[in-house]
Amino acid sequence: MFEKKKKRKFKLGLVLAALIVFYLIHVVYVVIAHNPSFELLSKNTISYSGLKAKIYSDNTRISFIQVSLGTEEENLYKIYQQSQSDNEFKEKIINVSFSPEDKVVKFIQKNNLKSLYLYYTIDYKNKFFDSNIEKKIKISIDFEPPNIKNIKTDSYVYVGGIGYVIYETSIDTFKSYVDTGLAEKFHPISINKEDTIYNLVFFTCGNRPCKNGVIRIIAEDLSGNSKISSRRMKTLLTKRWQVSNIKVDLNFIKDKYNEIFNTEILSANIDNFLELNKNLRIRNNSEITQNTRAITKDRIPSKRFYQMKNSKVFSGFSEKRNYFFDNPDSPLMSTYHWGYDLASIENANIYSSSDGVVSYLNNGGLGIYGKTILIDHGLGFYTLYSHLSEISVGVGDKVDNNIIIGRSGQTGLAYGDHLHFGTYIQGVPYDSNEIWDYKYFNQKVINVYKNFINQSKDKIIRKMGPE
């Protein structure tokens, strides 16, 4: 009896000891793992664009954050402070910007400092205790933005057309781009050599003039410093875009809605029309944009671009379409037509407009566009072929204007058998007449690119040779 009690006490002691060990391990784990961490996101550099950091706070409650700058010996300038009132968060981004008038900036400039120390304090509590973290990080100072020079352009675009600009940036440039006032940025083909980056950007201002008649060239470094240079860009308003009023046929919408959404509705209403022609159109255009953004630098069309053989244009680029149900003066919605509708015979052979590589296709149907092909011609230029009845190429296939890529049709939101042909540069549609005009495209794109390559090589040779 005594032995049994002794064994029970021994087992109970083992269980208690195990629980205590487990508890101590858990406490140690909480001490090690359940505390905030601070990460500097601005490449350990302070610049005019500011200082960016991230605080991770999983399983803790932070009550106070303070960030300061100073020397190795002394904390001098408080740049951020916040009391969190015990609010929980997993991640917190801290953004601090600077101006030339800030005391810390004047201190840096007065003392010609190349580095500084960032001090941070975080008060927090976890499951078992209250604590705080106090640390400092050595950071570099960079208030010098990249340089932009030797800007060259012919300073004009036709409305809906292509423009170009050539410029040089200093070697500390992390990225540069052209802003025309559109939502999209146009990035360069670049050649890096020694202390200079040579850049060529092809762009379009879409179906309207460039914003305020200028383009902005923007260069940024890794510290977040940026430089902006502007150039006048005259838009030649040689075209007036067509306007069409289209009455909504709900029987047609019903058939197309069932085809595209794979449904079996017996009748269509205005909501079905808007879902098809407005909401789906937005998603489809976004997918086209995403798949025509990339710049392929090692390919450039060696042949001219051709319009579809024996075709007639019956709808042009940037045609404004007003859709109405009963009253043309009260349209349900309006859209712009980002391409050309071309027609010849039914199920006509479709050839690539010029040499390139098939970069995207959708044999199941890209919504309102139906069966669709995208061809990458290099330098950020793409052509689009949609409403096809069949596709006879695959992604990665090399094509030219002698290769059949598919047949015309009426898949998607098409009223009859035709080809919808579109042209895009870095995701933005432009007027296809710019590439169908062989002489003009050579002048505006091909020769500009070749001269850019040759001149860059000449500059490199001169730099490498004797003065």
Image (spheres, rainbow, N blue to C red):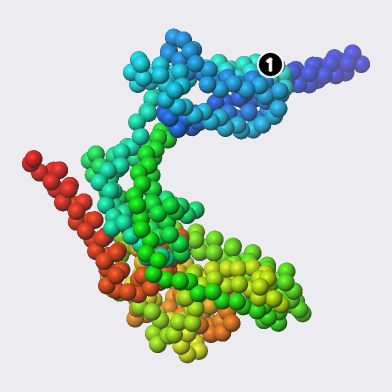
Q: Position of residue 79 (x, y in %)?
A: 52, 21
Which residue shows up at 29% across the image and 70% down it? 440
Which residue shows up at 43% across the image and 78% down it? 405
Q: Position of residue 26 (x, y in %)?
A: 69, 23
Horizontal side of 180 relative to 19 (left or right) equals left
* Quarter containing the N terminus: top right
The answer to whether any part of residue 163 appears in the image is no
Which quadrant would residue 439 be assigned to in this image?
bottom left
Furthest residue toward left: 466
The amino acid sitting under disc 1 is: Asp
Q: Nearer the viewer, residue 46 or 194?
A: 46
Q: Position of residue 266 (x, y in %)?
A: 77, 79
Which residue shows up at 30% across the image and 38% down it? 147
Which quadrant would residue 350 be assigned to in this image?
bottom left
Circle 1 is placed at which residue position? 130
Q: Position of residue 66 (x, y in %)?
A: 58, 19
Which residue shows up at 31% across the image and 54% down it? 165
Q: Nearer the viewer, residue 321 or 72?
A: 321
The answer to whether any part of residue 290 appears in the image is yes
Horizontal side of 12 relative to 446 (left or right) equals right
Furthest residue toward top: 73
Q: Nearer the viewer, residue 408 or 391?
A: 408
